[in-house]
Image: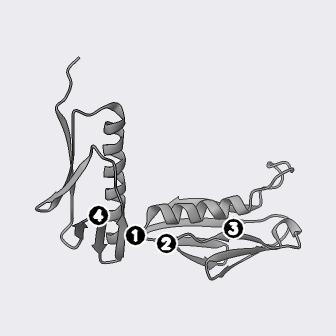
Amino acid sequence: MVLSANIIEEIEVPDDVDVIIDKDVKVKGPKGEISRTFNYPSISLEQIEDKLVLTTNFPKKKDKSMIGTTRAHLTNMITGVTEGFTYHMKIVFAHFPMTVKVNGNKVVIDNFLGERHPRTANVVGGAKVNVKGDEVTITGINKEDVGQTMANLEQATKIKGRDPRVFQDGIYLVSKN
């Protein structure tokens, strides 16, 4: 068994993106700014010219996985400030016509399965929700905020105690961009 002395991962930084490495990492781009703290002790992060370089010396299994996780987070941050993330959802109902409205940082779902009390879902962070007809579009620069908002909408319309083959009402994910 040969132990590798170190692992080096490189991430390309586009020209229109600025990365500031301080106590936390700030990524600025045309769509906005994201900051995140990475505090895993055996991984070092530095910027060399137009690349971000992640290094670790004599990695253990946990170090290898954390370097991959950190790389994925940084790549998502760069993608978010350049292109953004968009999730498309579809409102499906067969029995009772439901109405979906955005109220500040909450999405209100009225008349779901004929219920008298509205169901609500939280909009997380800087995600923006747009409802047009039976389409719901969630956009934002932070992938985790957009994904959690989408999951909150799906969970708010989860049906318990009924046959899911018959009661297929809800708000479902159609595509991610």
Q: Nearer the viewer, residue 94 or 36?
A: 36
In the image, what residue type sits under mark 4? Lys
Q: Which residue is mark 1?
A: 84
> Which residue is denoted by mark 2 in the rendering?
139
Q: Position of residue 30 (x, y in %)?
A: 30, 78
Q: Which is nearer the N-term, disc 3 or disc 1?
A: 1
Nearer-N-terminus badge (4/3)? 4
Residue 23 numbered tag: 4
Above-or-below relation of 90 to 42: below
Q: Position of residue 133 (x, y in %)?
A: 66, 78
Of callouts 4 and 1, the N-terminal one:
4
In the displayed orientation, state which residue is furthest to the top. Answer: 1
Is there CB contact under 8 Å for labels 2 and 1? yes
Q: Is residue 70 above or below residue 153?
A: above
Mark identifier at residue 91: 3
Front tag of 3 and 2:
2
Check disc 2 and give the amino acid type.
Thr
Could you give the CA–CA distance between mark 4 and mark 2, rounded to whole angstroms?
28 Å
Which residue is drawn at the image coordinates 22% and 73% (left, top)?
Answer: 16
- Secondary element under disc 4, as helix, strand or loop, is loop
Q: Residue at x 80, y 49 (%)?
A: 164
- Mark 4 vs mark 2, foreground winner is 4
